[in-house]
Each structure stands twice: as structure tokens, then as C-alpha cells.
Amino acid sequence: MKYFLDSAKLNEITYAYETFGIDGVTTNPRHIMLSGKPFLAAVAEIADWIVKEGLEGYEKFPVSVEINPHLEQTEEMVEAARKISAISPNFVIKVPATEAGIAAARKLEREKIRTNVTLIFSAAQAILPAKNGSLFVSPFIGWKEANGEDCRSYIKNIVDIYKNYGFYGKTQIICAAIRTPKQIVDCAVAGADIVTCGLDVYQDTMKHAYTRQGIDTFCEAWDHTAAE
């Protein structure tokens, strides 16, 4: 399973790449806002970092960038996507899971502009993006679980449907809006291709009370040795 970072902050992207070996990045308008930079400045900075690291090409290190969420017409979405995708060969265009978004993704894929259909909240919504050849589909986890829904069967159903019809691996399943290490595990068990979450969630995966207890025990023993 691949790990993507959900962020538009270059310092977080750099740290996560150097520490955890993340495989890609996902952004959205909120992440851009939190970066403190205008949209074009934020994505251009990421594009420059990609070149510096020698990661050119979405096959090596995909970066999902969302179009203006105010756009509701297919042609408007397609035009916006063309402009964004021209900035970097790593950029995969995020479009919403609406009729207009699906139509836009279909057209863009035919133009060899790769897409990520986002804001998926049901298995039914995940079928058409795969049928039309989108590179990614992003079912959201955290929001659903925050409203009392168990997402394990939801992700498993998408995985099973994709396997039934030969979509699995062609349209990759990104479990998005991950909030806890347990949600990462649930998605991994279900067979999702990718999880994307904030840096703090990845850091939490490495925390365990027994690991800390073990380090403290070994430090105490080390201090009692005669080693120089």
C-alpha cells in the first residue's frame, strides 16, 4: 500500500518524503489555504520541489491538485484542468463526484490528463470513475466515521467491485480524510491501494506506549553497563 501526504505545505512534504518515504501528495483548497500562499504560488512551489528531487512524472510521484470547486459545468472544469495540468507532469486533477465532474474526468482522461475523482462517499459513486478510466478515486473515511458509519465494509465493497470487473489496480483507490492509525489499518486490510492523511497521523502510527517503555528500559540498562 502506498502512503500519500494530505498537505500543500512544502516543509511537511519534504519531511514526510525524507522520513517516511511518501509516494505522492494530495491537496485540496483547504490545504492551499493553510499553506498561507495563493493557489498558483503554492502549486508552483511543489512543482519546483519535484524537479529538484528528480521525481518528474505522475508515475513517479503523483500530486493531486483540485480545480476551483465553484465550477459546475463540465467544460469549465475541463478548461481549468488543462491549465493546472500544464504546470507539472506530476499533477493529477481532482474533480468532484458529480455528473459534471464525471463527464469532465472522462474527457480529460481521453486527453491523457490524469484525474482523481474525489468526494466519494458510497461504493456506487466509485464505479463510474473506474469505468471511465480515472487514475484515482478518493473515498472519504473520516467524515463518514465521524457521523457514526463503519467504513470497513464501504472500502471492502469498492475493492471487491473493482476486482469483479478488472478495475482493481487500474483505477487506484485512495482512502482519503484519514484521521487515525486504525483507519489506515482498516483500509490496508480491505485492500485499498493508497491512504492519504496529514503528517500528524503518520507520526501517530509510530507511537506506542510499549515502544516508549522498551526504550526507557533499555536506556536504564545501558546506563548500568561498563561500556566506555
Image (cartoon, rainbow, N blue to C red):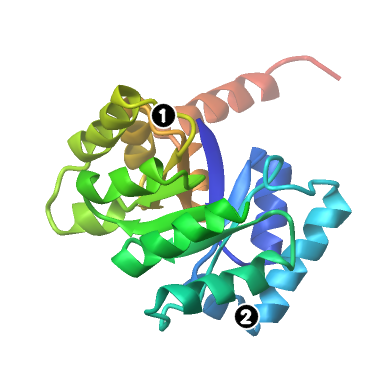
Picture quarter containing residue 42?
A: bottom right
Relative to 124, is 30 on the left or the right? Answer: right
Is residue 6 visible in this depiction of the protein? no
Q: Nearer the viewer, residue 120 or 162?
A: 162
Mark 1 or 2, nearer chain start? 2
Going by the numbered disc 2, the residue's amino acid type is: Phe
Between the residue at mark 1 and the residue at mark 2, the CA separation in whole angstroms equals: 33 Å
Identify which residue is drawn at 42% across, 56% down: 117
Q: Nearer the viewer, residue 78 or 147?
A: 78
**Which residue in the structure is indicated by mark 2?**
39
**Which residue in the structure is indicated by mark 1?**
168
Residue 158 position in % (x across, y down):
28, 36
| Residue positioned most to the top | 226
Identify which residue is drawn at 46% across, 43% down: 133
Residue 21 position in % (x across, y down):
67, 39
**Is label 1 or label 2 in front?**
1
Identify which residue is drawn at 39% across, 58% down: 118
Circles 1 and 2, Cβ within 8 Å, touching? The answer is: no
Q: Residues within 10 Å of mark 2 (few under 14, many from 20)?
A: some
